[in-house]
Image: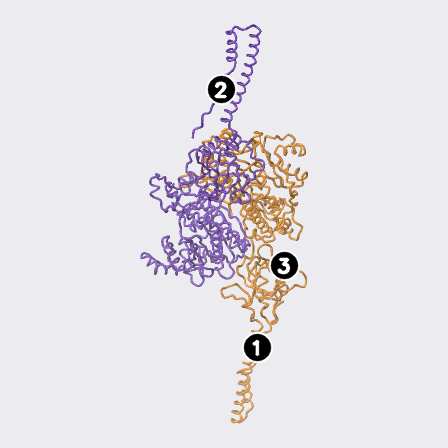
Chain colours: A purple, B orange
Amino acid sequence: MAEPSENPAPPQAGPSAAAAAAAEGGEGGISKKAAKKAEAKAKKEAEKLRRAAEQATAQAAAKAAAQTEDLAKDNYGQETHETKLSADVVEVSLKSLGEEHVGRTIELRAWMQNARMQGAKMAFIELREEGNLSIQGIVVASPEGTPVSKQMVKWVGAINPESFVVVEAKVQKPLDTVKSCTVVNYELHITKCFVHAAAPSVLGMTLAAANRPVANFSDEEVPIEQEVEKLSVAPAGNETTNIPAASMLTHLDNIVMHKRSAVQQAIADIRGEVKELYRSYLRSQGFKEFEPPCLIAAASEGGANVFRMPYFEKEAFLAQSPQFYKQIEIAGGRKRVFSVGPVFRAENSNTPRHMTEFTGLDMEMEIKKDYREVVQVLEGVLFHIFRNIQERCAEEIALVRSVYPSEEFLLPEPGKEVRLTFAEGQKLLREEGPEEFRNVSDDEDMSTPQEKALGAIIRKKYNTDFYVLDKFPEEARPFYAKEDPTNRKVTNAYDLFMRGQEICSGGQRIHDPVELEARIRTKGIDPASPGIKEYVDIFRQAGIPAHGGGGIGLDRVVAWYLNLPSVHLAAFYPRTPKRLLP
Amino acid sequence: MAEPSENPAPPQAGPSAAAAAAAEGGEGGISKKAAKKAEAKAKKEAEKLRRAAEQATAQAAAKAAAQTEDLAKDNYGQETHETKLSADVVEVSLKSLGEEHVGRTIELRAWMQNARMQGAKMAFIELREEGNLSIQGIVVASPEGTPVSKQMVKWVGAINPESFVVVEAKVQKPLDTVKSCTVVNYELHITKCFVHAAAPSVLGMTLAAANRPVANFSDEEVPIEQEVEKLSVAPAGNETTNIPAASMLTHLDNIVMHKRSAVQQAIADIRGEVKELYRSYLRSQGFKEFEPPCLIAAASEGGANVFRMPYFEKEAFLAQSPQFYKQIEIAGGRKRVFSVGPVFRAENSNTPRHMTEFTGLDMEMEIKKDYREVVQVLEGVLFHIFRNIQERCAEEIALVRSVYPSEEFLLPEPGKEVRLTFAEGQKLLREEGPEEFRNVSDDEDMSTPQEKALGAIIRKKYNTDFYVLDKFPEEARPFYAKEDPTNRKVTNAYDLFMRGQEICSGGQRIHDPVELEARIRTKGIDPASPGIKEYVDIFRQAGIPAHGGGGIGLDRVVAWYLNLPSVHLAAFYPRTPKRLLP
């Protein structure tokens, strides 16, 4: 609606009227006295008129000013050091917003998620806080031009989405529940609004696009048209499906918007809880935390897939696992230890399951009677994690599922945990698996497709997505794995699986240096080779109790629990052979 | 005492006696009949004697066997799969040992700390568990030879120290309190003892030596005689002072014994609590944990002291700080984040304050009104740590002090926290510091000796070992530091100190891309250079609120709190330019 042009015409008065009156008298032929009197009267009259005209002009000017001057000008704009909110304002976060705030004036610092004009005198905005919390705000021009003017409404309605703003507003109950925001029972009647940090007018990726499932995880750039076709995950049934999905590369190039998406915030929250639950459970079981080094002098697992680097006059390697150091902790007098930290694999694999850097949740413990004590702790900590995130993160899990649909993660009843031997697993695969796995051998390790097929059989048969395979064949395990003393073809080593994918590998280690050296030779390794020698020597320093442990991949636990299409979505900054940015 | 040689002489009987009797008869000239009669009688006699002799031999053999056979042979020895403890045995840890156990038979798995014979029939042993818990055990030969034989006593008394053993024992109250062990009110009367893992007969470093203060921290090998002279820390006044102290290199070469020492166990326990207190406090303040990457594409701080390595077809760097990533988290919609993880510095410094890999406790947060909100959180988390470890780790701190004596770490009363501006600190140094610091300038950063001198002045003046220096000069801070808008010669940046040594550096960051680029140019850096461009671009992606943070060095907090002679003692596996092992 256009502004009504109401500039009043100035009143016709002033010196010209007085002159006209004087001329009138002069032309009528009257006496000098009368003429003087008339002149004085005319002057008075003229003065009176002049004053009236002056007054009228001033009034008209004031009226005009009232129409154009912005009486709300201090209530909006770019935030500066002089920006001031009202003295009685209370700062709230949307999480804590409640009935006690209704009618009160609050301060909110948030992102402008959306802003749209509704006519010239009103704008609707959506303000978003950390996580996925959003609230509707209304900016309505006041008839008096303050606290909100039409100029202010127009300005607020044009704020770029994803700018960070500071608003002062009165909390009100909306007439109907708000459908577009997570806060449905309150709305904000904005009285001040300042832009603290402006977003660009065109975003590299909109929030709506960031909230769509990632279209593909290729390390190579793919044209947008192809991306949409390649979409491997079915889009959730909501109104955003007409927004094209972006590739992982686009997400990473727009990391700020990627991270602002509700789905990534939810994944990050779940990951944080998994990590915390891991630590708190192990601490409650008498485990002590330690930090293994990343920089090491030798590649203990044979040197494959290890990053090497110049280190002053020597060479250094990045640790592929903290296992050596976990064992030193046990040798050094600790009963139970755990660590949480980065591990590195220089594997040139571009798959949704691989990264070059990921977070290991490791543990190692003294074995008292039987290595299954370790399996029990590993099962225990994972059950603890699964059961608690189902409760603590129910909303976040639902949110992730709305973008990346998945079946519920099935857990067995307590006491019905599934532990099979590797041989039992292979038997199941031969008997109930697909045609091509009819001849799998008990002596060889499983392939990824075999593992997945077995996971499907176990889900059907035992109603669980989480299980243990124990007693891996001797040939499938490294030199430090303790053989089963009653059957040397297998080891006291196990893997833990989620949805048919390995998330944890572990076992009992050989703690006797003589036995260890013998097995190293059997494996065709020279016990004097770098890394191996230092490893064996540890067991010669003093008497070391039987021990075992395991390493859980945090990224995989999060990704497979949520059945994400790639582990890269579970990582904060996924590292792949082609990508180190951001 | 020698075993009495009681082999009885065999009785003189048998065929020779019968022959003598026959000869007797033959020589006397008697009748054939009488001779035959006599012969038969002699035969009978001989047979009788033979039987008696046989009986006597068997009896003697039985008696001899009773003297040498070991009736306790199943109660000691090398542990095997057949090793069995009694059915009713209860496994205990020394921590949980109490009055309810007196008179009961328990199982304990522990290290043989010491064993000595007391005559032929008794041995005293000391058994040690994780931490510093130890208990006295007594092995006494039973008169019946079981459950404990003299052979068993001798064998147990000869077990190599630092072997891992499993014992079965009855818990008893000792006549006097035990002085040599931490458990003073109970002792163990050993009935079974098995070696689970034997230590070598000569240890690379004894536990007593490992418990002595480290003699020197040089990266070069130093002959032992020199080491003792170089001893920088006064030895604690206990009976172990006649044991020569070893160098840090010797400790690291004997990492198992180094870690078994009570002092290192205590330091590790304190470190673990510091880390946990850091996390739990920040979580309680709304901070969310994330993991920054170690592998990065560019060295953002100019490329000095950064490790570089081949990364597939590219080059990668190891992160010197997670700052860039902390800021992306804030840009990505988090209000408050923290991380705990390794950071790397390729600094060729061989000092007690430097390592090439250490653990960073980092945090970053949105600033609402003033950057001092960040200082308050950093002060808050450190006070929380200091006050809680004083309570939770009182014993461990006392133990460390018994080896590395130090003055108590002074903390101000709540509300009397010391925050000085950098300029105020320099003024103190000029006015109350040593002669050579009379002319220090407000515009230049402080040297380590200046920092230490200021720490001493502040301790005397304000009775605290912990304080903040704020408003560092613009020239002393990097390009991302936010200048004080009211005085552009200084920045909204601060350091936190313990005992005059920096443990945390932080400040408000520039969040506006235009302001950031301008300051980068002022600092003489090209905003398009690798690492810098990616950094600035983050702030262009969307509107990012004002924020600031800090990074605390975990190793330093532990080391300086305990006033250890080197930060290397606080690390699990110290990394120096010359040392990557173990």
* Structural distance between the alpha carbons of marks 1 and 2: 148 Å
Nearest the viewer among A271 and B582 is: A271
Count neighbours of disc 1 (C-alpha within 10 A) and say few if under 14, some if 14 to 19, many if 20 or more: some
Q: Position of residue A407 (x, y in %)?
A: 40, 52
- Image quarter where the C terminus of chain A lies is top left
Q: Which residue is mark 3?
A: B183
Q: Is residue A125 above or below residue A547?
A: above
- The amino acid on which the numbered mark 3 sits, given as a three-letter code, is Val
Image location (x, y in percent) of residue A269: 48, 46
Between residue A520 and residue A35, name the one nearer to us.
A35
Q: Are marks 1 and 2 on the same chain?
A: no
Residue type indicated by callout 2: Pro
Q: Nearer the viewer, mark 3 or mark 1?
A: 3
Label 3 packing within 10 angstroms: few (<14), some (14-19), many (20+): some
Classify mark 3: helix, strand or loop.
Answer: loop
Q: CA distance from mark 3 to mark 2?
A: 105 Å
Chain designation of label 1: B
Of A105 and B76, the residue lying toward us: A105
Q: Are marks 3 and 2 on the same chain?
A: no
Task: Check the residue under mark 3 and report the chain it is in.
Answer: B
Left or right of A20 in this view: B145: right
Residue A408 makes an appearance in the image: yes
On residue B60, the disc is 1
Amino acid type, callout 1: Ala
Chain name for mark 2? A
What quarter of the picture does the N terminus of chain A occupy? top left
Which structural element holds mark 1? helix
Please identify the residue farthest to the left as the structure is shown. Answer: A435
